Amino acid sequence: MFCHCGKKAVIETRIGPLCKEHFVEFFESCVFDTFDNFELISNAKNIGVAVSGGKDSTVTLYLTQKYVENKNLNIEIEALCIDEGIKGYREYTINDLKRVCSDLKVPLRIVSFKQEFNYTLDESLKKINTKSCRLCGIFRRYLLNKYSKDYDVILTGHNLDDEAQSFLMNIFNANTDLIARQGPITGVISSSGFTTRAKPLFWCREKEVFVYSLIKGFNLRFVECPYASSSFREVARTFLNELELEDINVKYNLINYLLRILPDLKKAYANGEIKRCKICGEPSSQEICRACYYKKQLA
Amino acid sequence: MKVFLEKEGKYLDVEFKGKTVPDLLKQLNLNPQEVVVVKNDEIVLGDEPMSEQDDVKILSVISGG
Ligand SMILES: [Zn+2]
Ligand SMILES: [Zn+2]
């Protein structure tokens, strides 16, 4: 398979098969256009990039820095990592992360479950009877919210596949309110309680992110979270990837559809007061948020 | 053919019946959207021929965040 320039292709994209050089060009302009078109960081003075040591967040960090440099913007960038304390997993990705951040000369801030909750995820799971990924998600979100406040915008590594999977899952669960919170910039309520969250890789297929990180030689090792289990998301992923074999545009089409209905959904879910957790003050649908509820159980 | 399967962290001994990258993935029941095939340190796809002597790695696109 060959690129339009005649060289051997390394990946098939929605504009055809591309060689290394043309793919890098395509991928970067895809990300930079997302920054421009959705004004992801306009007016920001300091940005946090949520990082894990995985390919998505590493590519996000790298290209955010490149974008800021290209445009000569006066913006501070910090990498923010949440260390859940998962043995046999996080210590490896944090090592990769430290190397990447020092290569890019971006300051790295690590906040851990241990220091915030007194227990690592591994330890918490011995005290709380709930699914690992659920507890992990609740605590991660809590910490991300808490530390996001130090930045004007927080960027995450969510890619097109993540977004398409979430959209499908939200449809199957009839979670219209969650769909209203999707999109390249999230948070229905833009004023208080939420720092703007933005997704520079919004239009990038997961495979493209991976191939880009290979070409760039980020040298990230493959480690799987030991708690990873087959979930609804896996089913959605397999389903979408099988559809994509038939038509490379399926994820794009799905997300274009999402973007078409999103303004109305956001409007519909915009009014309504934000309820807050009585303990921590974070937005919560219940009197006490799930994070505080579980924190109490750990105490 | 010796194939390194990254996800499993081990070499497979594959009795390769086909000729190309898609043939190999089909035989191993892998979705081409979810893996990258590296032959002699180059990413390959499509009708790229594969043979016994090649050093083949199959990398997994999907990994945690
Ligand atoms: Zn080319
Ligand atoms: Zn709370």
Image: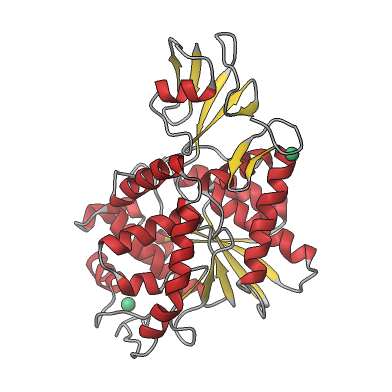
Picture layout, residue A45 above or below residue A137: below
Q: Residue at x 44, y 13 (%)?
A: B14
Q: Nearer the viewer, residue B26 or B39?
A: B26
Q: Quadrant of ligand 1?
A: top right
Q: How many marks?
A: 0
Which residue occupies the extreme left position in the image?
A: A129
Is there any visible trace of residue A213 in the rendered image? yes
Residue A217 spot, x, y in % from top left: 67, 39
Residue A174 spot, x, y in % from top left: 26, 67
| Image quadrant assignment for residue A285 | bottom left
Quadrant containing the N terminus of chain A is top right
Q: Residue at x 50, y 21 (%)?
A: B4
Q: Nearer the viewer, residue A295 or A171?
A: A171
Picture layout, residue A65 above or below residue A25: below
Is there any visible trace of residue A83 in the rendered image? no
Q: Nearer the viewer, residue A101 or A286?
A: A286
Residue A69 spot, x, y in % from top left: 78, 63
Quadrant containing the C terminus of chain A is bottom left
